[in-house]
Amino acid sequence: MPEPLTLTVSLRGTREVRENCQLFRLAGLLDAFSEPTFRKAIDKFVEEGPPNFVLDLSQIDFVDSSGLGALVQLAKKAQGAGGSLQVVTNPRVTQTVKMVRLEQFLALQPSVEIALENLKKS
């Protein structure tokens, strides 16, 4: 059952713990304003485990360089904990990620279902 996340006025979402991963569904803005709160919340969840993350950003309206930095940090922390990060995206987020050539590193996926399947394979 998804639990609501209290992030910021401009960023909201839910967290669901599955057997092998944590699934986050976020909506709004992942930017310089929301990034510190997002990063602090995610750091806590990395420690709690499981170490695999699926981040559903398909409802994100805008991501800036601060938001991308937070995603890179999350990917590194997940890998450091023996897990991985799968990012479900939309055209706007994909365009931003591709501009800085991070699409391979952030493992962009077209749907939550595909992201979850990828975790089963790894």
Image: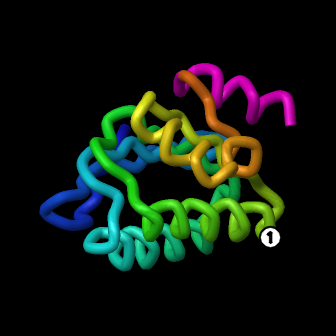
| Residue 108 x %, y % | 63, 36
Which residues lie in the magenta part? 111-122
Q: Nearer the viewer, residue 54 or 64?
A: 64
Q: Amino acid at mark 1?
A: Gly
- Which quarter of the rendering shows the N terminus? top left
Q: Is residue 115 magenta?
A: yes
Q: Residue furthest left?
A: 9
Q: Identify the residue at horizontal 18%, vertical 59% (top origin).
A: 10
Circle 1 SS class: helix
Residue 113, placed above or below residue 72: above
Relative placement, left or right, of 83 versus 87 is right
- Which quarter of the rendering shows the C terminus? top right
Residue marked by disc 1: 80
Q: Nearer the viewer, residue 71 or 103?
A: 103
Q: How is the image coloured?
A: rainbow
| Residue 98 x %, y % | 61, 43
Q: Identify the residue at horizontal 45%, vertical 73% (top origin).
A: 39
